[in-house]
């Protein structure tokens, strides 16, 4: 590797004042210790407590939805989101192949089948033009439901994912869902703090899911949330994620097979403190993107992934795109050896053993992107 990349790693280590810079570390410099200590001192660490409600209300308020239901992780949030919109066994659910495993797993938990769709090179979100012509070709409406003409299965929902915090083309996706009678469920796990035309991601779907895993823009240790404007669906999500227990002072009655997916109070306490810092994290990540833009500009054959013109991104994970002159793994080796932790994007879902038989459209772009994307250090830091 040449001098330019050496300088690149030096610049980053100087910025973070470290010899080894991790890909993404949580930042706890607010009221985290106070709130968590409060849980321990009062004994309210588990399944009941005021921080859960406070976190749910704070989150819903920030995003601009009526309700948020806090759960144990983002995968559980997706699972329940898909269940409450009516995804059933043997349905197909359209998802990008270029996503984290959680999206495909959540579909599978319902005995439904992931149906993989192509992404756009510029946004890494679903390619809406290709999706529309693909659906015209392979699907047909029958009594208000969309069916796959080849497999004969119902195609129930579409799950766009806002990759690394960059919003998908939501107007087009909403129009496709209207036209083809698909339920829109957003995987907004990576996009807390990202806006499409001024409207927060996760507010376009009937329901959406977020994650507060340790590497996300805010963390509750592990955690997730189901977001919706539909009060009835929110109540049902709460019910299902709290073992479907019928409220009663002392009796244990459950009216269906529920899930123990509720977020513990101690995690929500962490979340409340993190929410207070969220605006700062977003600002720092956006500044970090500008910093990277400056240092990367001088290197040939690479580009920083920038927010689409219609969007304001949280720049959750900083992303560089390599052209053909690069061998991805050589650069990964170099960066990791020189103190800048970097990693490739996920292996596309359709290439994983358990999903190779799933229906899919042409995924040439997805396959090409796999070889040309690297994520670099993204922990919020004071750039200015
Ligand atoms: C993080 C993430 C999730 C949820 O992951 P959990 O670890 O279960 O919280 C879902 N989808 C995407 C795209 C993610 O990045």
Image: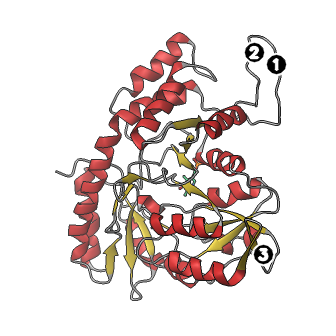
The residue that mark 1 highlights is 252
> For the point 32% across and 76% down, which residue is it?
303
Q: Nearer the viewer, mark 1 or mark 2?
A: 2
The residue that mark 2 highlights is 248
Q: In terms of secondary structure, where does tag 2 sit?
A: loop
The residue that mark 3 highlights is 357
Report how far apart the C-alphas of labels 2 and 3 lie in the structure: 46 Å
Are the two marked residues, 1 and 3, in contact with CB atoms closer than 8 angstroms? no
Say whether residue 98 is visible.
Answer: yes
Query: How many marks on residues?
Result: 3
Q: Residues within 10 Å of mark 1 (few under 14, many from 20)?
A: few
The answer to which quarter of the image holds residue 94 is bottom right
Report how far apart the C-alphas of labels 1 and 3 lie in the structure: 43 Å
Q: Please determine whether, in this image, residue 42 is positioned above or below residue 23.
A: above
- The earlier-in-sequence mark between 1 and 3 is 1
- The earlier-in-sequence mark between 2 and 3 is 2
Q: Please determine whether, in this image, residue 97 is positioned above or below residue 220.
A: below
Front residue of 183/144: it is: 144
> For the point 80% across and 57% down, which residue is it?
111
Locate the N terminus by quadrant: bottom left
Report how far apart the C-alphas of labels 1 and 2 lie in the structure: 8 Å
């Amino acid at each position: 590797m040449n001098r330019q990349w050496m300088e690149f790693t030096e610049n980053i280590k100087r910025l973070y004042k470290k010899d080894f810079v991790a890909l993404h570390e949580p930042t706890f410099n607010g009221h985290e210790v106070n709130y968590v200590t409060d849980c321990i001192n009062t004994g309210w660490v588990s399944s009941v407590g005021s921080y859960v409600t406070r976190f749910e209300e704070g989150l819903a308020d920030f995003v601009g939805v009526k309700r948020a239901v806090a759960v144990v992780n983002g995968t559980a949030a997706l699972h329940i989101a898909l269940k409450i919109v009516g995804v059933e066994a043997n349905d197909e659910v359209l998802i990008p192949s270029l996503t984290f495993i959680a999206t495909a797993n959540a579909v599978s938990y319902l005995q439904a089948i992931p149906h993989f769709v192509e992404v756009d090179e510029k946004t890494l979100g679903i390619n809406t033009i290709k999706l529309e012509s693909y659906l015209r070709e392979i699907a047909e409406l029958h009594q208000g439901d969309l069916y796959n003409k080849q497999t004969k299965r119902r195609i129930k929902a579409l799950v766009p994912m806002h990759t690394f915090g960059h919003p998908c083309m939501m107007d087009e996706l909403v129009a496709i869902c209207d036209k083809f009678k698909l339920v829109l469920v957003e995987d907004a796990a990576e996009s807390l703090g990202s806006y499409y035309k001024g409207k927060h991601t996760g507010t376009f779907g009937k329901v959406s899911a977020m994650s507060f895993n340790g590497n996300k823009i805010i963390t509750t240790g592990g955690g997730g949330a189901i977001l919706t404007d539909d009060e009835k669906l929110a109540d049902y999500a709460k019910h299902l994620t709290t073992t479907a227990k019928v409220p009663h002072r002392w009796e244990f009655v459950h009216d269906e097979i529920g899930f123990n997916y509720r977020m513990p109070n101690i995690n929500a306490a962490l979340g409340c403190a993190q929410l207070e810092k969220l605006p700062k994290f977003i600002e720092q990540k956006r500044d970090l993107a500008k910093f990277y833009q400056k240092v990367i500009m001088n290197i040939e054959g690479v580009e920083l992934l920038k927010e689409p013109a219609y969007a304001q991104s949280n720049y959750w994970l900083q992303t560089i795109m390599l052209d053909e002159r690069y061998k991805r793994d050589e650069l990964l080796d170099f960066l990791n050896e020189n103190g800048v932790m970097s990693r490739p994007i996920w292996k596309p879902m359709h290439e994983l053993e358990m999903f190779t038989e799933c229906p899919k459209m042409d995924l040439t772009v997805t396959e090409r992107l796999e070889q040309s994307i690297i994520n670099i250090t993204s922990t919020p830091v004071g750039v200015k």
